[in-house]
Image: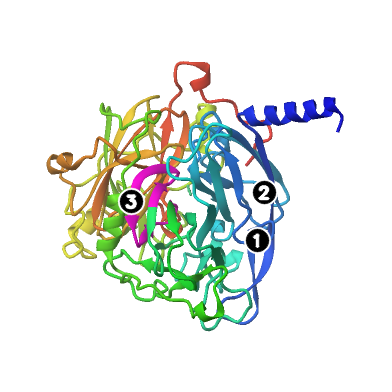
Amino acid sequence: MPRSWLILVFALSAAAAVARSATVEHTFNVRTLSLPRVCQPGNISITAVNGRVPGPKIEANEGDTVVVHVINDCPYNVTVHWHGVFQRGTPWADGPSMVTQCPIRPGHAYTYRFNVTGQDGTLWWHAHSLFLRATVHGALIIRPRRGAGAYPYPKPDEEKTVLLGEWWDARNGDFFIGSSLGSADAYTINGKPGDFYDCHTTPNRIAKFEVRRGSTYLLRIINAALNTAFFFKVASHTFTVVAADASYTTPYETDVIVIAPGQTVDALMVANASQGCYYMVISSYQSAFPLRPGSFNANVTTAVVEYVGAAPSEQHAPALPAMPELTDTTTANRFYTSLTSLVRPDKPTVPLDVDTRMFVTVGLGFSSCDPAQKSCRGTAGGVAASMNNESFALPTAISMLDARYRNTPAGVYTRDFPDQPPVVFDYANVTKNVVGSSAATLSSTGSPSTKVRALRYNATVEMVLQNTALVGRESHPMHLHGFNFFVLAQGFGNYDGATAAEQFNLVNPQERNTVAVPTGGWAVIRFVANNPGMWFMHCHIDAHLAIGLAMVFEVEDGPTPDTALPPPPPDLPKC
Ligand code: C2O
């Protein structure tokens, strides 16, 4: 090679090494896909991206620009949400249908553009319209900045994405759109149900992870299931949890991981068992009390962890780990409360001066409006979900962010989301709040409403999330768009500010975008509203979001041009 070329090659690679950011570009073709059923003969039609479930994995480095061209060739309206991405300066790209944008209609396309700056770890993307996220989802992995960053733990030899999902054999799009969901027919690991659904007849039914003895693996675990929290184990192996929801944690050793819908967990696993095969298993955590028999699938789903190079004499049938009981709240709570954030000099710490305090009940209640009326929602018997007794409904004419931008909220939303529930009662006590009791009557929801809590730019918000037991207590995974929040404390029963304050972790509380509020209990979160926009907060159980377990924060503009809401991208879909 001539000398000048060598110099050029050297110069180019040096330039690449110092390049701080890049553009990561994808095209998502959203189409109807026919796949074999898990437990019945024949195929079903589902909606998927690029012909796969899970869909494509997006891999970026901190500071990169992500560009995704979404081409909607399916028969439904579609939007895509980038779960956990802050979207600072790009609130129009967040994705929830009718909150930040009108959906992409069938036959139309839209390009999402945003930066992944100031955050790294395991996130994911999913449809945020109707129930389409059941099959329209995938991983979004942000590695530390090119050339600069490294993980704050020993570098693993390899990374494995482990995406957990739910599968319905009886589903087609219309079923999903028309009704609330029953029990899943299978849980899945990377789209596959594993060995314990005997009805399964198709080949290639189990996900396989090859490992080398002595190597360390970073498992990036994502719960993309619509409605189910999971216990996760690998026989004969333990984990060191190093991050949750793309926030680094103090290393936490455990043999069981608990993960609610919407959450992610990064865990190191050393392949230090004897050569052979081991099952990776997920089973559901059922937090509802009373338990609703028939409302969930009690099966386990498996994948295989296979040591490469095992001699024939070392090969054996995969070992199964002992899984917690379905209702093992003690194990779930131990995991959820054991995480703390990794304190690092460049990371924000928990804000100490609170200026906005909210006490918000979350749970299922009874709809007091006439079920025959169209605006009434919920299943037979009038079950509706609410926050502070407000059962949330999406607007239909224009998106909430558009209404805020044009300063025309009238007819779209109102700014009266309450900071307190309308009545004080024994929130957490299921035995006293029986159907038809006065507490139930008092806390029945009226017609669905579209209420926001307006927040001054940079306000520090403390929110107590209190589960109610009017229909039954249950752990609700509460997800906030646009921010991470600190989880200061969690507990069971009714929140008591005086005693809870003593439990607050103000040193290294875990930072998340989705908190599983303990069943029949409470969690306290704090965040700084430094991101102007309209930010959805909702239960990440889709069946509950659909019946109103949601609200929206309207974060006002800051004092500078770059802290003001930008105009919508010119090609944003119209309603
Ligand atoms: Cu991953 Cu609004 O949700």
State yes or no: Cβ of the residue under disc 3 lies below 8 Å from any atom of ligand 1.
no
State yes or no: Cβ of the residue under disc 1 lies below 8 Å from any atom of ligand 1.
no
Q: Residues within 10 Å of mark 3 (few under 14, many from 20)?
A: some
Q: Main secondary structure of the magenta part?
A: strand
Q: Is 246 inside the magenta-drawn segment?
A: yes
Q: CA distance from mark 1 to mark 2?
A: 21 Å
* Amino acid identity at mark 2: Arg
State yes or no: Cβ of the residue under disc 2 lies below 8 Å from any atom of ligand 1.
no
* Viewer-nearest residue: 160 or 383: 160
Q: Residues within 10 Å of mark 1 (few under 14, many from 20)?
A: some
Earlier along the polypeptide chain: callout 1 or callout 2?
1
Q: Say which residue label 1 marks.
A: 52
Q: Is residue 512 visible?
A: no
Q: Residues within 10 Å of mark 2 (few under 14, many from 20)?
A: many
Residue 417, image x and y in percent?
A: 34, 38
Q: Say which residue label 2 marks.
A: 105
Identify the residue at the far top of this view. 560
Q: CA distance from mark 3 to mark 2?
A: 45 Å
Quick one: SS at disc 1? loop
Residue 481, image x and y in percent?
A: 45, 41
Q: Is residue 231 visible?
A: yes
Quick one: SS at disc 3? strand
Earlier along the polypeptide chain: callout 1 or callout 3?
1
Give residue 219's mark: none
Quick one: SS at disc 2? loop
Residue 529, image x and y in percent?
A: 39, 30
User: Which segment is the magenta one?
Assistant: 241-265
Earlier along the polypeptide chain: callout 3 or callout 2?
2
Q: Residue at x 56, y 51 (%)?
A: 139
Q: Say which residue label 3 marks.
A: 252
